[in-house]
Image (tube, rainbow, N blue to C red):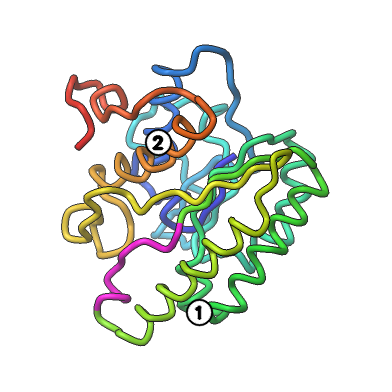
Amino acid sequence: MFVGDSMTIGATGDFTWRYRMWQHLNATCAGPYRIVGPRHTLHDPAGGTAASTAYADPGFPDEARRHLAGWGEGWLHMAPLIGDAVRGHRADTLLVSLGLIDLGFYTNAEQTAENVRHFVTRARRAAPHIRAVLMPVIPNVRAAADPAFGTECTRFNELLAKAVADLSTPASPLLLASEPEGWETGRATYDGTHPSEHGEHLLAGAFAQAMHQAWGVGGPYRAGVASGAAVPAG
């Protein structure tokens, strides 16, 4: 189950990094898998709602579009929802990219880290053996322009790493994903925050690398496999 904010739900006309991950798993997983979640749409900027189905590839099947992501939603919003989502959709693996919205509008680094812990607790109540990959807050235009906000992002990432270390167990492992290699906002985003097609590959690749190295899921990420070309990532 993909869990995230605007970078994960995507907007009208996007492929999304979820799409890139779907292609990657199709190409590298030895056995069957399912993408699950209560939502399946994109954000519609014109209407300000999550009502768009206009993915860049109309062949992206509905069953693979599933997620728990929302424009303007963060750890604060997802912690109360994750238990029912995991239970109702029988998720066993979470790929989570959250935090920027929290720090930008709702909570400081310490409060946001506390919501991470609430999120993990509720997910485990629903599925005691659930595993998760957690992405830190990645470079963005606001952090670059506002030193105080940048410091808050750095502090949260430190607390997130501590939470992962504290909470991970053999029965319910947590992984801290690495910042996507080569993430430069001018190329990896289209507006300083939201991923461009290049950025989509970088995000998917960071999650794929974590799962492959730690759990043997899939294989090394290759952008060519996830775009129809024959070019390795990076």
Three-letter code, disc 1: Phe
Q: Name the residue located 45 percent from the left edge and 77 percent from the top edge.
A: 104
Q: Name the residue located 61 percent from the left edge and 62 percent from the top edge.
A: 163
Q: In front here: 82 or 181?
A: 181
Q: Are marks 1 and 2 in contact (CB under 8 Å)?
A: no
141 in magenta:
yes
**Residue 5 relative to residue 119: left or right:** left
26 vs 20: above or below: above
**Residue 63 percent coordinates (x, y):** 57, 27
* The N terminus, quarter of image: top right
Residue under numbered circle 2: 209
**Residue 120 relative to residue 164: left or right:** right
Q: Residue furthest right?
A: 125
58 vs 162: above or below: above
Real-space CA distance between mark 1 and mark 2, rounded to the nearest whole angstrom = 31 Å
Bounds of the magenta segment: 136-144
- Helix or strand or loop: what does disc 1 sit on? helix
Mark 1 vs 2, N-terminal side: 1
Q: Name the residue located 19 percent from the left edge and 22 percent from the top edge.
A: 229
Q: In front here: 157 or 13?
A: 157
**Residue 109 percent coordinates (x, y):** 53, 77
- Helix or strand or loop: what does disc 2 sit on? helix
Q: Name the residue located 52 percent from the left edge and 61 percent from the top edge.
A: 161
153 in magenta:
no
Residue under numbered circle 1: 105
Q: Residues within 10 Å of mark 1 (few under 14, many from 20)?
A: few
* Quarter where residue 59 is shown: top left
